[in-house]
Image (spheres, grey):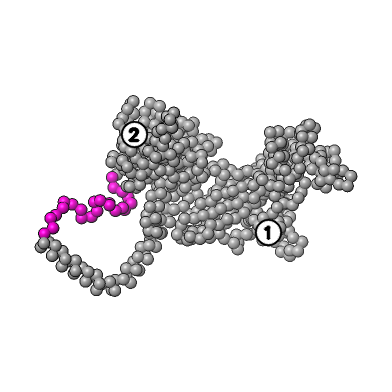
Amino acid sequence: MNAGREAFEPDVALATAVAQIRTGDGTVVGAGFLIAEDLLISCAHVLEDGGYGVGDEATLVFPRAPGAPSARGLVLQEGWRDSTLQQDIALVRLDRVPAGTAPLLLGSAVGCSGHRMRSFGFPAQARPDGHFGSAVAVGLLPPADGTGELLQLTGANDLTTGFSGGPILDETTGLVVGMLTEITVPDRYNRGEGIAHATPTAELRKAWPALNVQDVSPYRALDPVTGPGSGPRRRITPVRAAGGTVVALALVAAVVVGQHWYSNRAAVRDVAAHRQAEKSVDQHTLPFQVVVDGPDLRRQGVWAFALDRPLSPAEQAGLAPFKPEDLAGVRAYLEPLGARLLPQGAAPEVSGNTHDPALDVIEQREKQGMVGGDTYRLHFTSDRSSSVTIANIGTTDVSCRPSSAVSSVVAPSAGTGSVPSVFLSLAVAPDTPAVEVDDEGFAVSMDYFAHNKLDLGQATTPGDIAVQVGGVTGQVCSWAFKVDYLTSEGKFTAKVDNRGKPFTVETLPTHLAQKTSYYLGGATNPAHWMNCADEPTRCDMS
């Protein structure tokens, strides 16, 4: 276990020091990493892909640092190396030091041939907060075509688009020896796959002379060949052999005599050292990771579509082959016409059997425009040895604007398909506690987290919770989740967004120019789609 912890420490430092470089609309175009507290290095072509040049302010996010902090950074003239003519290097001066980050330690790439290398980046197939990639160093290529040296890597299939500008860490020394610059394309025989090139630290230092490059690993390791005491061989003579035997026997006796005295004391020291090691690792480990699944757009019998224009009579007639339970078919027909699928979850209800007057506030919130929304499942995990507690989940960065919908196509009510969850409404203040909802859609309490918590860390089972976020009538609202959590260091808050963008929910206006619904049929009239303006009574019943 200790060996695993030691191996993990540089991984944490590596991941938290790597930033996403994003365009103005939040698209990730590549990576960069910290070489000083407020200085980031990347490839010039990554900045150019993001629409940035010298003198521009770039948008950066550190997704593996606690709270995924963002920053703005000035692209410096100093150190800029054009991506087409020179060494492809860019330096970015941050406007602030992101919390939970630290610059990486750099070493020389000389003599690293055969060493395993590790990097961190943001390819399209990775999780939103990135993943690791690996390769093996082949050696340093001499300068050519006006550029400096390049470190050639092989077995680099992991290092694809999204890793450009990321660090190349030597697993043998624990030091970063270069920056990933390019990947090669195989020939017509599919030979030459998995080859990549990195700009070694010696070239990075030419761009930024203040760069500190060291040769001593920050992580303790044992040399399998030249361990302590190695040196020139000495000839073993009989006298030396006899002397060695006497010394060895004496040492064995000393060990036997002293073993009982020191065993308990050593055990205490081992426990203390183990706890200190775990604490040190925890300080470099993210408190938790969270994956958000949803919204679920595969609902059967509970759905609505919004359009910014009325359907023509012919388009309404085109719905005839579909039944409400055939959501996939209806969706395939309506979306090319400009329709968008909206949430149809219901707001919590107050059971007629309840006697808790605190729940009466739900009816007041409905008058303020609170309606149902979609359910998201938040899956929490933690790699920490110490405990991490999710103490509260709410919303933040809430912003609403009027819906542009003028017509709708809705399925007749067939139940809301409720699941046990907590309910957050965007129609009330963001700090309003989450309502606890049972599997029948009834409110159980007005503050779920007053008596429930999610405990993570300490090798506990990952925590999952379903959260329904209700919209506001006739509005398109955006938001992010706000997660309050507790660790041994105190109470903290993290923001969880939708891969760098806000979550959104839209609800239909009360008054629409057109509404199309499905009549389930009766004794004399078959089931059919109807324009509610033509059959208002049946539409009210559906």
Whether residue 251 is visible, yes or no, is yes
- Residue 439: x and y in percent read 68, 58
Classed neighbour count for the residue bearing mark 2: other residues with Cα under 10 Å, few (<14), some (14–19), many (≥20):
many
Q: Earlier in the sequence, mark 1 or mark 2?
A: 2
Residue beneath the point at 28% across and 45% down: 215
Q: Which quarter of the figure has residue 358? A: bottom right
User: What kind of residue is marked 2?
Assistant: Leu
Which of these two is toward me, 489 or 241? 241
Residue farthest front in this picture: 189
Whether residue 43 is visible, yes or no, is no
Q: Which residues are magenta?
A: 215-237
Magenta segment's dominant SS is loop
**Residue 150, labelled with which disc?**
2
**Residue 365, labelled with which disc?**
none
Residue beneath the point at 35% across and 65% down: 270
Considering the numbered disc 2 on the image, is that residue within a helix, a strand or a loop?
strand
Image side of residue 27 versus residue 512, left or right: left
* Circle nearer the viewer, 1 or 2: 2
- Residue 321 position (above or below residue 453): above
User: What kind of residue is marked 1?
Assistant: Asp
Q: Which quarter of the figure has residue 273? A: bottom left
- Residue 204 position (above or below residue 261): above
